[in-house]
Image (cartoon, rainbow, N blue to C red):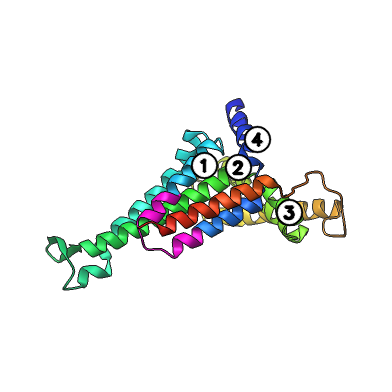
Amino acid sequence: MIGALSAVDKRASSILGRTSPLTKLAIAILWLLGMATTTRHVAPIVITACALGAGLVIGRIRPGDLGRALTPLWLVAGVVILSNIVLGAANTEPLATELIRLGPLRVTAEAVSAATALGLRVVSIASVGAVFALTTEPTRLVDALVQQARVPERFAYGALAAYQSIPRFADDLTTLRQARRIRGLPGGWHPRLLIGLLVLAIRQGDRVALSMDARAFGSGPRSRYRIVRWGVLDAVVALAAAGILGIALSLR
């Protein structure tokens, strides 16, 4: 527990942790759009390497945390690559370079190239998203959206409350299953559990709404406990990210 808190503190005090969440969000969107517009293999590799390097070095993310976040995403990328190799439209082209033929299955070099390019883009998008999520505290992101992007407070903090309530569903589901066992019913999954979860979610939403009303969210100007400001660091990080994207897209 102490180790986990220490890792979070290190990320918060790192260069990426001190950068405005909106700056990082803009960089992530810019990089993702850049990856969506290219079909080359080099650009996604460069973006992936830079994103992971930035997360480890200037984001101070522990390799284990980054690996756990990326493993399922990269597995999805692997499935995307394999499915596109087998089912790629280029495999039906008579003039395509055939690599493998197993009965009706035909794999061509063009299909492998297209599938690899798509898979690398998925890997790069997953890597950028993971680094952004691991170096950005949800509360600070909402503060930045409200203070810098002028997002309505009720919407922003309501979304934050909903996000932070997600882990409660696991506890609520455990409680409902235990209640079924006490009544002599099977404790496994049952569709009726959804009704109980819905009722608990509505009650939790009512409590959050009352709490926000009691704190006068959205009723007018209010003071801020956590101030999020633009700074020189944001400009440096943004310029470096734009330069990296430009170089990556120019490589062949």
- Three-letter residue code for mark 3: Tyr
Q: In which quadrant will I find the C terminus?
A: bottom left
Residue type at mark 4? Answer: Ser
Asked which secondary structure carries label 1, the reply is helix
Mark 2 vs 1, N-terminal side: 2
Secondary structure category for the residue under label 2: helix
- The span from disc 4 to disc 1 (Cα, nearest Å) is 14 Å
Q: Is residue 182 left or right of residue 35?
A: right
Q: Secondary structure at mark 4?
A: helix
Q: Nearer the viewer, mark 2 or mark 3?
A: 2
User: Which numbered tag is attached to residue 54?
Assistant: 1
Q: Nearer the viewer, residue 245 or 214?
A: 245
Rounded to the nearest angstrom, the CA distance separating label 3 from label 4 is: 24 Å
Q: Secondary structure at mark 3?
A: helix
Residue 232 visible in the shown view: yes
Mark 4 touches mark 1? (CB < 8 Å): no
Q: Which residue position holds label 2?
A: 16
Magenta stretch containing residue 39, yes or no?
yes
Q: Which residues are magenta?
A: 32-47
For marks 3 and 1, the one nearer the N-term is 1
Q: Are marks 2 and 1 in contact (CB under 8 Å)?
A: yes
Q: Residues within 10 Å of mark 1 (few under 14, many from 20)?
A: some
Amino acid, disc 1: Ala
Q: Earlier in the sequence, mark 3 or mark 4?
A: 4
Q: Which residue is mark 4?
A: 13
Q: Are marks 2 and 4 in contact (CB under 8 Å)?
A: no
